[in-house]
Image (cartoon, helix red, strand yellow):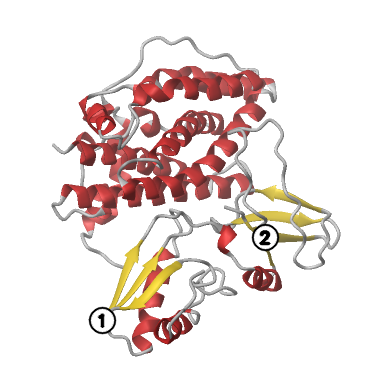
């Protein structure tokens, strides 16, 4: 197993799956502007995923392109974190999840744009610009919801409490992470945690929300052990490509 | 923007200036900065470097097809397209002339890209984009996200028109 291929799958799959989740809001947003915003962010994430998965396919060298990797892998071969595959829940839940992800992603992409792997660095530099307005969008909403009405505060706090145990996986490190970190291709995940905590704590405080205590943290998705939700998501995402392989329109 | 130094490259650029962006047809793909480099190689192949504007821009594939089609029509049978990521695309590449074209088309041109600020700023300084219709700066940004990835939605209180802004990126 090539650690770089594996690492690129993790980067690409995180963005593909969260992009798909956000796209589920299309036509269901609480306001027209927000409907458009979530669809825009989804499009950015899916675009980032396609660049990353194309590079993964090139690194793998077995002739798989981004479509082959997106549509013809089963859940057990997906490498996204569990955080992004969880169902959307209500708008507050979606926004809190996005914020926890965006705050991590923007810090990671900032490091990746200085990767020793030049093509990854280029993709990351572009994605970093997008991640900056993503975290601004989700972060502002967390503050508005947390410091809004009793109902919006309650829902935002619930979401934070439910999602917190899924954040540990973003900072877990295994042999793949250590191998790419050794070549200065990517930062070792735990090194990003202090800066992430600082951004998250600041926004949570301004949102009048309470930071959950670190307890049990879910793990295993980077090795293919996912929640039951991923299979259902993939069934919907992949059915067209699998029913009509090679279809063009 | 790339500029032609020799007649051969200038002729190729002339062809590419004829390829409009499918979503913002007021600008062509060279003015937008999508075409980073074009050259006629000794083996007769026209090599074009393109860079995506936004990672998920759905027009990118159409743009690539349009570029190839235009070069074919210009008599260049062999075309090779390469996607480059560095340096990352920025609206700072738009010339004053390109910005004037956007404004004439009814889209407020982008301001300069902002210098780095806090990730989630407590107070956001939102640029009051001058209205492309009446020029008033009594405008308000309604949403950072618009009909395409590259545009934001604004409203002009003076002429009471909603309008779009090409976002600085």
What is the x, y in percent for residue A102?
48, 34
- Nearer the observer, A119 or A137: A119
Q: Which residue is mark 1?
A: B42
Residue A112 shown left or right of residue B140 in the figure: left
Q: Residues within 10 Å of mark 1 (few under 14, many from 20)?
A: few
Residue A37 in view (yes/no)? yes
The residue furthest right is B158
On whether disc 2 and disc 1 are found on a single subunit, the reply is yes
Kindly report the distance in space between the C-alpha atoms of the residues bearing marks 2 and 1: 44 Å
- Nearer the observer, A112 or A143: A112
What is the x, y in percent for residue A226?
27, 28
Mark 2 and mark 1 residues within 8 Å of each other at the beta carbon:
no
The vertical placement of B38 against A66, above or below, is below
Q: Quadrant of the C terminus of chain A?
A: bottom left
Tell me which residue sits at (62%, 44%) in the image: B115
Q: Quadrant of residue A147?
A: top right
Q: Which residue is mark 2?
A: B164
Chain under disc 2: B
* Label ID, residue A12: none
Q: Secondary structure at mark 1?
A: loop
The vertical placement of B163 against A31, above or below, is below
Q: Earlier in the sequence, mark 2 or mark 1?
A: 1
Chain under disc 1: B
The residue furthest front is B5
Tell me which residue sits at (48%, 59%) in the image: B53
Tell me which residue sits at (56%, 35%) in the image: A138
Residue A26 shown left or right of residue A154 in the figure: left
Tell me which residue sits at (77%, 59%) in the image: B130
- Nearer the observer, B82 or A166: B82
Front label number (2 vs 1): 1
């Amino acid at each position: 197993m090539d650690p770089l291929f594996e690492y690129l799958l993790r980067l690409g799959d995180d963005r593909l799956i969260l992009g798909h989740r956000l796209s589920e809001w299309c036509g269901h947003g609480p306001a027209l502007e927000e409907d458009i915003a979530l669809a825009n962010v989804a499009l950015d994430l899916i675009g980032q995923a396609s660049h990353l998965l194309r590079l993964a396919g090139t690194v793998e060298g077995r002739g798989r392109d981004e479509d082959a990797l997106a549509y013809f892998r089963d859940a057990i071969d997906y490498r996204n974190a569990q955080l992004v595959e969880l169902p959307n829940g209500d708008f507050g839940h979606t926004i809190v999840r996005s914020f926890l992800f965006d705050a991590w992603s923007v810090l990671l992409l900032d490091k990746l744009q200085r990767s020793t792997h030049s093509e990854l660095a280029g993709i990351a530099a572009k994605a970093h610009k997008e991640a900056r307005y993503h975290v601004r969008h989700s972060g502002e909403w967390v503050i508005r919801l947390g410091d809004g009405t009793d109902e919006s505060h309650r829902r935002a706090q619930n979401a934070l409490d439910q999602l917190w145990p899924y954040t540990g996986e973003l900072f877990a490190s295994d042999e793949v992470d250590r191998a790419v970190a050794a070549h200065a291709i990517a930062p070792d995940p735990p090194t990003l945690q202090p800066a992430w905590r600082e951004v998250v704590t600041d926004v949570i405080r301004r949102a009048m929300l309470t930071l959950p205590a670190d307890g049990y943290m879910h793990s295993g998705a980077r090795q293919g052990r996912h929640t039951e939700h991923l299979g259902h998501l993939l069934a919907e995402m992949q059915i067209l490509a699998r029913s009509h392989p090679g279809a063009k329109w | 923007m790339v500029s032609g130094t020799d007649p051969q490259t200038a002729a190729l650029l002339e062809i590419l200036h004829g390829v409009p962006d499918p979503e913002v047809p007021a600008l062509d793909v060279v003015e937008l900065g999508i075409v980073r480099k074009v050259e006629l190689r000794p083996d007769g192949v026209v090599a074009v470097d393109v860079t995506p504007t936004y990672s998920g821009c759905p027009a990118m594939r159409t743009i690539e097809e349009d570029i190839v089609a235009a070069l074919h029509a210009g008599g260049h049978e062999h075309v090779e397209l390469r996607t480059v990521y560095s340096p990352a695309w920025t609206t700072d590449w738009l010339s004053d002339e390109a910005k004037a074209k956007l404004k004439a088309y009814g889209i407020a041109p982008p301001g300069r890209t902002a210098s780095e600020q806090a990730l989630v700023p407590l107070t956001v300084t939102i640029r009051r984009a001058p209205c492309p219709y009446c020029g008033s700066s009594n405008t308000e940004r309604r949403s950072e996200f618009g009909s395409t990835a590259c545009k934001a939605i604004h409203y002009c209180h003076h002429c009471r028109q909603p309008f779009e802004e090409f976002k600085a990126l």
